[in-house]
């Protein structure tokens, strides 16, 4: 395993000219997206992919795109919060993390968290020019706990979550490839979590 200095990571927009063929996060679905879909989808203005370099090697990447989150998905607490501010809309603006992967030789060194923090600061800057309140992700169940540790919150209520995890456990027994692709929606509130980074 390689040890890296997170401060030396350089994040660059993927324009299709960089060689991504040696990147391997150990998850076929995520690798395949980077190799086959990322640049094509960017050309059609569907999303943007960023590559994380360390010592001229791609050690991670993420893809972001615009999104919105419906207030009914956030539950009564958020409904009341916005209602009290006289801002009752059906949906609120968000940036979605479409994909995020870390090279399998660089796991457990804080790179994934570093990429989430980069996305957070990127969104904070963006929010100065356009309305933007949330970051959303449909996280693979395999890495659900990683996002929870990084202050992402569940969209589903507790009973629905239990149901989804039971489905996942059943799928693991029948078809592990299908289970690996199962996701749980999560969100991060930029406004409420500002204090995590700016206090």
Image: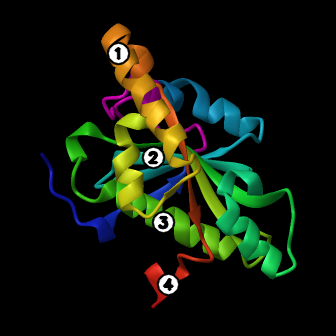
**Residue shown at the point (45%, 23%) measured from the top left:** 167
In magenta, the rendered stretch is 14-31
The residue wearing badge 4 is 195
Contact check, label 3 and label 1, Cβ < 8 Å: no
Q: Quadrant of residue 20?
A: top left
Residue 122 location (% of width, % of height): 59, 68
Q: How far, Cα to Cα, is label 1 from label 2? A: 25 Å
Q: How far, Cα to Cα, is label 3 from label 2? A: 11 Å
Q: Residues within 10 Å of mark 3 (few under 14, many from 20)?
A: few
Task: First in sequence, mark 4 or 1: give its number.
Answer: 1
Q: Quadrant of residue 176?
A: top left
Label 4 sits on a secondary structure element that is helix
Task: First in sequence, mark 1 or 2: give its number.
Answer: 2
The residue wearing badge 2 is 61
The residue wearing badge 1 is 176
The residue wearing badge 3 is 118
Which quarter of the rendered picture does the N terminus lie within? top left
**Residue shown at the point (44%, 37%) measured from the top left:** 162
Contact check, label 2 and label 4, Cβ < 8 Å: no
- Choose between 13 and 167: the one closer to the eye: 167
Q: How far, Cα to Cα, is label 3 from label 1? A: 32 Å
Contact check, label 3 and label 2, Cβ < 8 Å: no
In front of the other: label 3 or label 1? 1
The reply to whether residue 132 is in sight is: no
């Amino acid at each position: 395993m390689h040890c890296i200095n997170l401060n030396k990571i350089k994040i660059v927009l993927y324009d299709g000219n960089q060689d991504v063929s040696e990147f391997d996060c150990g998850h076929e679905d995520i690798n395949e997206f980077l190799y086959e879909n990322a640049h094509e989808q960017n050309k059609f203005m569907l999303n943007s992919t960023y590559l994380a370099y360390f010592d001229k090697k791609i050690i991670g990447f993420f893809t972001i795109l615009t999104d919105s989150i419906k207030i009914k998905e956030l539950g009564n607490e958020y409904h009341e919060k916005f209602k009290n501010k006289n801002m009752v809309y059906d949906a609120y603006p968000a940036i979605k993390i479409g994909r995020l992967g870390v090279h399998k030789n660089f796991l457990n060194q804080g790179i994934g968290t570093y990429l989430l923090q980069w996305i957070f600061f990127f969104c904070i800057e963006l929010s100065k020019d356009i309305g933007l309140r949330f970051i959303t992700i449909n996280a693979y169940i395999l890495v659900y706990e990683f996002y929870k540790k990084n202050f992402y919150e569940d969209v589903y209520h507790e009973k629905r979550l239990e149901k989804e995890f039971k489905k996942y456990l059943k799928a693991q027994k029948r078809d592990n490839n299908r289970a690996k692709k199962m996701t749980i929606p999560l969100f991060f509130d930029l406004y409420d979590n500002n204090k995590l980074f700016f206090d």
